[in-house]
Amino acid sequence: MDNNIETVFTYRSSSLQDTDALAAAIAAVSEPGMVIGLDGDLGAGKTAFSQCYARHLGVEGIVNSPTFTIIKEYEGRLPLYHMDVYRISLQEADELGLEEYFYGQGVSLVEWSSIITDLMPPRHLHIELKSSGPEKREITVTGIGEPYGGVCRALIQKWGKET
Amino acid sequence: MKTGTGALKPVYILAIETSCDETSVAVVKDGCEVLSNIISSQIETHRAFGGVVPEVASRKHVEVITLVIEEAMNAAAISPQNLTAVAVTQGPGLVGALLVGVVAAKSLALAWGKPLIGTHHIAGHIYANRLVKELQYPNMTLVVSGGHTELVLMEREGEFKIIGRTRDDAVGEAYDKVARALGFPYPGGPHVDRLAREAEVAFPLPRVWLEPGSYDFSLSGLKSAVLNAVNQSKMKGLEPDVAGIARGFQESVVEVLVEKAVRAVREFSAGQLLLCGGVAANKGLREALTLRCAAEGIELIIPPPVYCTDNAAMIGAAAYVKWKHEGGIPLDMVADPGFSLEKWSVSAY
């Protein structure tokens, strides 16, 4: 029943500027109701990626970490729901009613989404950041189902299967 | 538009706070005298529900709100007809959590025929200082908590201007994340504070000042520097110098906070420096600020720990200022997760 096809794109970033270019490309093809999960160790650059993404989605002003507040809402070209489930459990996340955001009119960007894998919609875009040096990051973008496969295909068209 | 009451007679405000982890209700007289301040995580009845912290889920607030209201009214020994108004945290916070407090406050205001005062959570933290001392204007507040790191100028009572804020992680959050990197469970900020004070030598870590003249803060680079230090030790097969790193981190954070706060006090001719938020309990920060302010001749106010973390007494203190200048607001008020502090400023001037 869950036959959502995964499309994978691997991006090697050697600076924040590179990461910004990836965030810009994803923001450019973002649509209402999209859900993006972000994972990676502490300091891998999840919030840095979110800041780049938010700016390219047209959010003005400072976008800072939502770890404590869990959800921060912003207005850009689309509404942006910036979430961080780092400090809560799966059960607590469930009781928060995140699905109202996931199925809303904006983009949901979820840091530490692997904590709530069971709550994430079956179709979403998953971004994994791995440190491969102080500045270097290996970023794996996985589109699960559509339209997320399309996002990955747009990235592959721009950069090739791997950068 | 001046609709305020001027607050001539004693004003008793019932205040409700449910913006995040705590369900809290207080009764505050004249914005400075706490008659009661009940916080759900501290009361016995809450245990019957197996309450867990954090109470981010609105269901948890719903379970205890009526009990906490009742306990606050009993502890203050006040009857509803003697209350002047009902205040509630309108934002910022989690919408589901805020809604519980807002609906409770509206219901009480309607049932008791009392005015409603929507209150800003950070204004509450700032006015926690009024529970300790009379405030002078202009003053400067350093807000340091798990979710906020800001320098706020008040030129007049109830008029807020954010002159600096974090561009990435909040101070409390950086502490908790560094604690995790050093092997402590969440929330581990207090462990870092304690370790830092035990270490003999500080591991050298950078200070992040940003552009000259900026009052903004940035903590993610420092967090990354800590992670690099830990990882490099591990790659060499050595145990990281946990205490030394904790001290290096604490010294870096505290030096930048103190320096920017003192510079802001000078530039804006503030008569007092106020500290607030959960990280105000950090001993390293308290000591450094106390020493520096004494040397500079700046009056420093730090509320006791119970008024530093989330509580409703501080909401009662801030609501009093709003009440004095503007009175109540209509019952169709809505919870606002992204409530702006500057826009909440009193407009009566």
Image (tube, coloured by chain):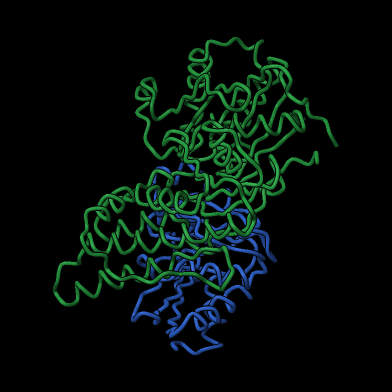
Chain colours: A blue, B green
Q: Quadrant of residue A113?
A: bottom left
Camera-side residue of B12 and B200: B200
B275 versus B181 height, above or below: above
What residue sits 45% from the left and 80% below the top?
Answer: A9
Residue A141 rendering spot, x and y as whole percentages: 46, 75
Depth check, front residue: A119 or B15: B15
| Residue B139 locus on image (x, y percent) | 61, 47
- How far across and how far down the image is residue B95, in percent? 59, 42
Looking at the figure, which quarter contains the C terminus of chain B?
Answer: top right
Residue occupying the point 52% across, 82% down? A17
Count of numbered badges drawn on the protein: 0
Is B41 drawn above or below residue B270 in the view shown? above
Image quadrant holding the N terminus of chain B, namely top right
| Residue B236 in the image, given as x and y percentages of width and height | 16, 77
Position of A128 relative to B65 (above/below):
below
Q: Is residue B50 left or right of residue B149?
A: left
